[in-house]
Amino acid sequence: MPRPRTLLLAFAFAVSPVLAQAQPGRAADAVAEQHVLEIHDGQMSLDGRPLPAQNLPEGLDLHGIEMTYTFVGPVSPVLEIDGVVYVLEGEHFKRLSETDRAGVQPYFFPEMPEAESQAAPAPAEASEEAYLRQVSERDRALYDRIQREVELENETHRLAARIRSTSDSDTRARLLESLRNKLGEAFELKQAIRAEEIAQAEAQIGELRRLLDERAARKSSIIERRIEELTGER
């Protein structure tokens, strides 16, 4: 009987919806060439080609894991296997802690039942769900405000439906006033949420700039390491 394994998936280094909206040009780039990462019978394959052992971390055991992961555009798939985070860079599968992106937090999809593992959610839905999951873990107050925003949106739709269905002028006026108040509350809440998300996105950008500067300072060592990886000489 296969031993139990844990597996989480992510689009590497996904950012919050606010940061994504600030880069509209990236949307077109994402609709690009499709790739498939698979794990089957203890072997990892990319686009149907088995990855050689030297392209995998030493000692990585993939037995007991069955997975198909389709991705498009300039993303680096991230997998958390048995509590260790790995990232695919080109055709090399590495521990995230051993790459230049160590310390950058990817957004993981929630775990799915095995029967659903072949039918991953749409990228936009999964990204939003993963974002909310991580917000709930790191900033409960912000998560509660986002949940309240969703509740208010639903309430405004219900009020609008009642307004459309009534012909009584007094009832209509009362419902319109209630709708106006709900929309005012929703507006203020949305402003507060967006301001907090922007502040967090700015902090993330600052961290990414710091990592970029560190990478620039290690240019020579990075180039030498890539030469070793590409030539197989270590």
Image (spheres, rainbow, N blue to C red):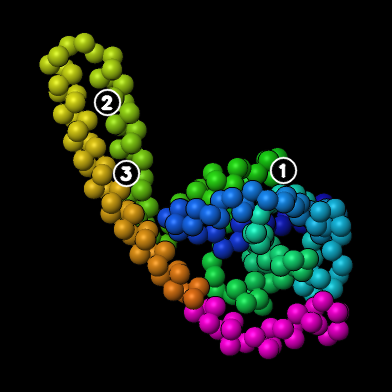
Q: Which residue is mark 3?
A: 148
Q: Which residue is mark 1?
A: 118
Question: On the rendered image, what quadrant is the C terminus found in?
Answer: bottom right
Q: Does residue 70 appear anywhere in the picture?
A: yes
- What number is the disc on residue 159? 2
Identify the residue at image location x=82%, y=57%.
45
- Name of the residue lying farthest toward the left: 170
Kindly identify the amino acid type of the residue bearing the numbered disc 3. Arg
Left/right of residue 199 with respect to residue 41 in the rendered view: left
Question: SS at mark 1?
Answer: loop
Kindly identify the amino acid type of the residue bearing the numbered disc 2. Leu
Answer with the quarter of the image where residue 65 lies.
bottom right
- Where residue 123 appears, as percent x and y from the top left, is 59, 47
- What number is the disc on residue 31? none
- Name of the residue lying farthest toward the top: 167
- How much space separates mark 2 and mark 3, taking CA atoms? 16 Å
Say which label, 2 or 3, has the lower sequence index: 3
